[in-house]
Amino acid sequence: MASIDRSDPVILGHVLAEHRDLFSRMQAIKTAFTDRPRPTADRCAGIRAALADLREHLRTHFELEEHGGFMEESIARMPRLGPAVAAVMKEHPTLLAELDTVIARLSGGDVSADAWVEAGRGFEHFAAVMRDHERSENAVVQEGYNEDLGLD
């Protein structure tokens, strides 16, 4: 059994891989919004699918965080991190709801140019909030494991 005062490279590696995957998905969606100005039906359907995939990925990611894993381990290592972990987890429903709003803007038949622009802005806002959320999460994990993940 690993000592509690040492970082666990498997857990930290998992955190890094999860965050890289998440940011890769978000960047692909951001790029899709900015590629061409005209929202065709196929393009809207593709982005809706990517957004739905991102939402499911986040739901699963959040569920794992809320039911054990590295956040719980951070608290076990440093109980004073409990309020910080609770604050990070409290953001999960809001983040999912914000993504749902973006998806809803692209739902239905023909998406207007205005709806497209609003969805793009909504996604930009979501992505900024998500980056802040992940920074807070990283800070908790780094403090809990006393390990610099190099993710500033």
Image (cartoon, rainbow, N blue to C red):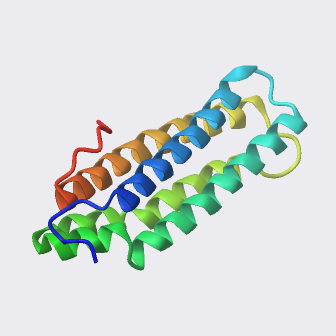
Residue sitting nearer the eye, 150 or 53: 150
Q: Residue 3, relative to residue 28: is it above or below? A: below
The relative height of residue 97 versus residue 17 in the rendered view (above or below) is: below
For this rendering, which residue is in front, 1 or 101?
1
Q: Is residue 109 above or below residue 82?
A: above
Residue 106: give x, y in percent of width and height.
74, 46
Could you tell whether 60 is left or right of 71 in the image?
Answer: right
Viewer-proximal residue, 111 or 82? 82
Q: Position of residue 75 (x, y in %)?
A: 21, 72
From the image, which quarter does the N terminus lie in?
bottom left
Residue lying at the far front of the rendered structure? 1
Q: Residue at x 55, y 46 (%)?
A: 21
Tally of numbered tags = 0
- The residue closer to the viewer here, 38 or 52, is 52
User: In the image, what residue occupies the spot 35% across and 55% down?
Assistant: 12
- Residue at horizontal 28 percent and vertical 72 percent from the top: 73
